[in-house]
Image (spheres, rainbow, N blue to C red):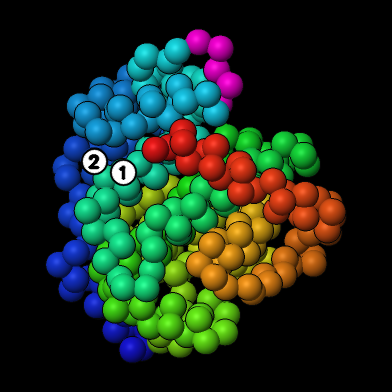
Amino acid sequence: MNQIDVYQALEASPKMPVIPPAIRDIFEMIRQPDLLDVDLLAEKVSLYDGLNQAVLANVNSGYYQISRTINNINEAIVFLGMKTMRNLLIYFITELLFHDELGKSTLFSAHQYWKHNLGTAAACNMLSSKLKIGDKFQLFSYGLCHDIGFAILNACLPELVDKIYEAMHRGVHHIVAEKISLGGKTHADIGSWICERWGLPEDLGLVVKYHHSPLLSTDNLNEIELIHVADCISTEYYQRLIGLEVQHPINARVMQNLGITNDMVEEIGKSLPDEVEKVSRIFA
């Protein structure tokens, strides 16, 4: 399957979600946060019951250490900031659009992969706190969304996901397995494609596109580098869950740029399973 074929196959898939008009309006609004009417956004989100409830339940879960209950989207935006709220909305919209189709491949466990996304978000949050770099809530939301390309693959082309996992269980690195199965493309390429197709915000698109190759990006470098490190830490955790023992070395220049030590990586890796379980209870 060549480069053109994989995108054509995704376009032709009956599982590719059609974004409802109300959701499309939200996507369009959050593309330009500087021009955003917060009251109008809150009104749009409140009309979509599943989305409204999911966001408020998450904000009030205890993870964000809020001293009082937040009762509406307006308050949530003020507390978390527009970029964090925007990415949470994108995450929950993606969950709503793909919920019924997740896990259709034979070898792939959507539940276990969900833990990898939570692991990446949690590891990024911990790194941000330790290094005093970036907004840890915003980075947490980036971690939740970074693998949107794999959600697309699992929903639309589950037979290719099985092919990727067959190669991984033979010892092939997951990125190499993806390139073999997808005609040179990876889930990051597909995620970048869907971000452009849906008109998602540029900074999120950069995180999705470059989280495996952070030094190729010229924008949002610190955030992308942090996601790269968190993703590597969480990928090792996730692959142990599915019975693989594969090391995922972190780019040495990225570690130097951020001031990350091997001891720090090891510490976060050891604490990640407990942190994921805690966050899993919140998101459940």
Residue at coordinates 62% horizontally, 68% vertically from top-left? 213
Distance, label 2 to label 1, CA atoms, is 8 Å
Examine the image and state in which quarter residue 284 appears: top left
The x, y position of residue 75, in whole percent, is 43, 16
Residue 65 located within the stretch drawn in magenta: yes
Name the disc covering residue 23, or none: 2
Quarter of the figure that contains the N terminus: bottom left
Q: Secondary structure at mark 1?
A: helix
Q: Quadrant of residue 58?
A: top left
- Looking at the image, which is closer to me, 94 or 22? 94
Disc 2 packing (10 Å; few <14; some 14–19; many ≥20): many
Estimate the x, y position of residue 7 in percent, counting from the top left: 30, 75
Q: Is residue 269 magenta?
A: no
The amino acid sitting under disc 2 is Ile
Q: Nearer the viewer, residue 229 or 278?
A: 278
Question: How many callouts does the rendering have?
Answer: 2
**Residue sitting at 79 percent across and 67 percent down?**
252
Residue 166 in the image: state x and y as whole percent.
43, 83
User: Main SS type for the magenta part?
Assistant: loop
Q: Using the image as rendered, state which of residue 33 and residue 140 is in the foreground.
A: 140
Please tell me which residue is depicted at 52% across the width and 38% down the height of the picture: 279
Residue 93 is marked as 1
Callout 1 amino acid: Ile
Where in the figure is residue 254, as x and y percent of width and height? Answer: 75, 61
Magenta region: 64-68
